[in-house]
């Protein structure tokens, strides 16, 4: 469960974030229900654990940025962040991968890209045959929404900027940021704030950073 609003007739209940406490579910479950709340109960793919072990052994590149805001992206954050990043003057060799939830968002992003950035930006649709794990493995820094991908990236030790697009995402992102080295921009961000934040973060990472693995996220 992720809302903590409805009653459940169950023997075991799992809430996979630290947004609520076990007490919240006392009135929503029968007596004797085993209630498990927290990031430590996150149900993650088994392959994530293998990737985490591999990432510890890989050399740092600092050359790949991933932008992903899910399938729906009602506020078109994909287009906004893609355009902002494309206006930065990056060194040659840096690659930006932008994942779009549908073809209309993809076309909009492509139209907004600056001409000088087109050879550095790779655009992809989030389809079932897309190898998300490979993308995350190659990522050195990500700009994402506050959904499952932000938790998976944190588990892999990949630094993120999280821009929530809903209250639930906002709560999850803030709870996650208390435990890992992620930055969270509030929902009411301005474009100037995003530009300043992304520039400062990328400058900091250019001068060197290390992936930090977090035992709190051993799901």
Image (cartoon, helix red, strand yellow):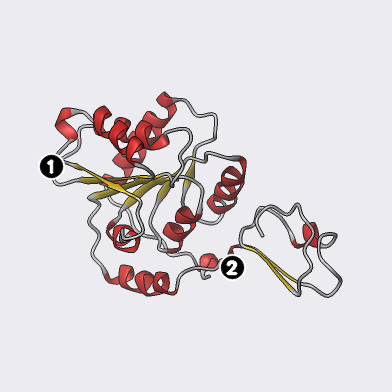
- Most foreground residue, 211 or 1: 1
| Image point (61%, 58%), residue name | 17
SS of the residue under disc 2: helix
Q: In this rendering, would 108 be left or right of 214?
A: left
Assess disc 2: are there few (<14), some (14-19) or many (≥20) residues with their C-alpha within 10 Å of its C-alpha.
some
SS of the residue under disc 1: loop
Answer above or below: position of 171 versus 148: above
| Image point (38%, 69%), residue name | 52
What residue is pinned by disc 1? 92
- Can you say which quadrant of the picture contains the N terminus? bottom right
Q: CA distance from mark 2 to mark 1?
A: 40 Å
Assess disc 1: are there few (<14), some (14-19) or many (≥20) residues with their C-alpha within 10 Å of its C-alpha.
few
Residue 217 image position (x, y, % from top left): 52, 65
Counting every numbered tag in the picture gives 2
Q: Earlier in the sequence, mark 2 or mark 1?
A: 2
Residue 172 image position (x, y, % from top left): 58, 50
Q: In this rendering, would 96 be left or right of 73?
A: left
Q: In this rendering, would 72 be left or right of 114?
A: right
Answer above or below: position of 83 versus 66: above
What residue is pinned by disc 2? 40
Which label was assigned to residue 207?
A: none
- Most foreground residue, 199 or 127: 127
| Image point (58%, 43%), residue name | 170
Residues at discs 2 and 1 in contact (Cβ within 8 Å): no
Instruction: Please tell me in which quadrant of the rendered image residue 161 appears.
Output: top left
Residue 130 image position (x, y, % from top left): 31, 58
- Most foreground residue, 39 or 105: 105
| Image point (75%, 52%), residue name | 5
Answer above or below: position of 9 versus 135: below
Q: In this rendering, would 203 be left or right of 89?
A: right
Residue 21 image position (x, y, % from top left): 73, 58
């Amino acid at each position: 469960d992720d809302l903590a609003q409805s009653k459940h007739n169950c023997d075991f209940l799992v809430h996979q974030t630290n947004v609520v406490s076990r007490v919240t579910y006392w009135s929503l479950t029968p007596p004797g229900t085993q209630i498990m709340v927290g990031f430590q109960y996150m149900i993650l793919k088994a392959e994530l654990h293998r990737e985490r072990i591999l990432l510890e052994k890989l050399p740092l590149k600092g050359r790949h940025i991933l932008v992903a805001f899910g399938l729906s992206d009602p506020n078109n954050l994909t287009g906004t962040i893609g355009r902002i990043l494309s206006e930065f003057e990056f060194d040659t060799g840096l690659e930006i991968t932008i994942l779009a939830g549908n073809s209309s968002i993809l076309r909009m992003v492509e139209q907004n890209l600056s001409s000088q950035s087109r050879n550095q930006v790779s655009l992809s649709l989030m389809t079932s045959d897309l190898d998300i794990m490979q993308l995350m493995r190659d990522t050195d820094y990500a700009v994402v929404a506050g959904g499952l991908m932000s938790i998976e990236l944190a588990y892999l030790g990949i630094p993120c900027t999280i821009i929530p697009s809903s209250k639930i995402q906002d709560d999850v992102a803030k709870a996650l940021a208390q435990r890992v080295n992620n930055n969270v921009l509030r929902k009411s961000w301005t474009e100037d704030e995003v530009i300043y934040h992304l520039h400062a973060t990328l400058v900091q990472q250019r001068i060197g950073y290390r992936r930090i693995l977090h035992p709190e996220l051993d799901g």
